[in-house]
Image (cartoon, helix red, strand yellow):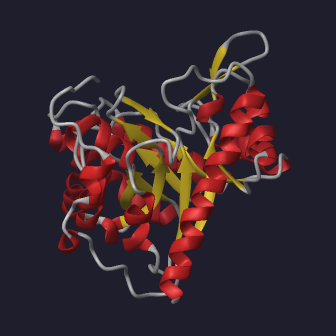
Amino acid sequence: MNRPEAHLTRRALLRAPAAALAAPSKGAPTVFQLACMTLPYRPFPFERALEGIRKAGYRYAAWGTSHTTPGGRTVPVLDVEAPAAEAARVARRTREAGLEPVMMFSTVHLEAGGAPRAHAHRIEQAAAAGIPYVLTFGKTSPGEYGRVIETLKHAGPLARAAGVMVLIKQHGGNSATGEDCARIVREVGDEGVRVCYDAGNVLDYENQDPIADIQKCWPDVRAFCIKDHRNTPRDEDCGPGFGEIDHYQLFLPVMRTGLTMPLAFENIFEPLVPRPATPEGVDALARRAREYMETVLRGLAAHAAS
C-alpha cells in the first residue's frame, strides 16, 4: 500500500510530546513469552518451521495458517473444520519439537457468514490443544460492524468456559487501531475477549502512530503480534528493529501488568531485499528478531528497576 502522502517516520515519532506517552503500569513485572510464528516459514514444511524456531532459541511457538509440503502442496496447519483431536495431535507435534504452542489464528474474518460457529470451533480446538489464545480480526475495509460484535459476544463466554481467550488485532476496517479494538472490547463486555496489539499494522494500514495509539488500549492488551513497518524508502512490513517503530516506547506501558503476555513474531524479514530462499535463512532472521526484542525488554526492565 503505497502512500506517498504524510509519511510517519521514526524521527516524527520521537518528536511526539512527552504528555502523549502513558506512564508504565505499576503492578508486578510482566512475563513475556517470545514465540515465533510458523508463518515466516510458510514456504517450508510445518515440521521444518518447528525445528527452525527451536534452533533459533525460542521456547514458544504460534501456529501460522498454512505450510508447503515436501511435495509442493499448500496445506493448513489446522483446518477450521478439523476435529478437536486433530488440534491435540498438532499440539503434541509442537511440544515434541521442544516448543510450547501459545497462539493460533482463527483464519475467519469476524464479519464472515458463519463466523460465530467458526470461532466456537476454533475455541474448542484451542482448548483441546492447550493453547490459551485464539487470534482473530476483521476485513481490511469497514462495515458490518454489528457482525463483529455478534461474533465476539458469542465467542466470549465459550472462550472463558474453555480456558481460552479470543484476541482481536489491528487489521484495518473495524479493528484498524488499538483505540478501535478497545471500543469493540467495551461493547462486547466479556473477559474472554481482549486485544493482541499489532503495531506494524497500525502504521501500515492506517499510517497512524502506534506509540500514541497503544496509550488508548494497553489495559486491554494481552499479547503482541511482533512486526515493524517502513514507509520509506519503500512501504513495507519488516522484522522488529528494521522499521520505523520504537519498541522501547511501544512496550513502556505494559512492562508491569503482572500478566503473562506472548509476543508472537509474525514478520522477521529484512526490508528492501528478497526473503530468504532457504529455511536456514529464515532461522537466522528468527534468531535476530528474538535477540533484538530481548535487548529491548532487558533495557526496559533495568530502567524500571532503577
Front residue of 248/60: it is 248
Q: On screen, 88 above or below 223? A: above
Q: Residue at x 38, y 50 (%)?
A: 245
Report whether residue 128 is seen. Answer: no
Q: On screen, 165 above or below 89? A: below
Q: Where is residue 126 in the image (x, y as percent from the top left)?
A: 58, 50
Q: Position of residue 162 (x, y in %)?
A: 53, 61
Quick check: 52 left or right of 302?
right
Quick check: 18 left or right of 67?
left
Res 75 quadrant in image:
top right
Q: Residue at x 27, y 74 (%)?
A: 22
Report whether residue 267 is seen. Answer: yes
Front residue of 218/271: it is 271
Q: On screen, 115 above or below 57? A: above
Q: Position of residue 64 (x, y in %)?
A: 58, 36
Res 147 quadrant in image:
top left
Q: Which residue is drawn at 26% across and 70% down?
A: 21
Q: Where is residue 51 in the image (x, y as percent from the top left)?
A: 81, 39
Instruction: Give the number of marks.
Output: 0
Q: Which residue is drawn at 36% across and 61% down?
A: 194
Res 296 quadrant in image:
bottom right
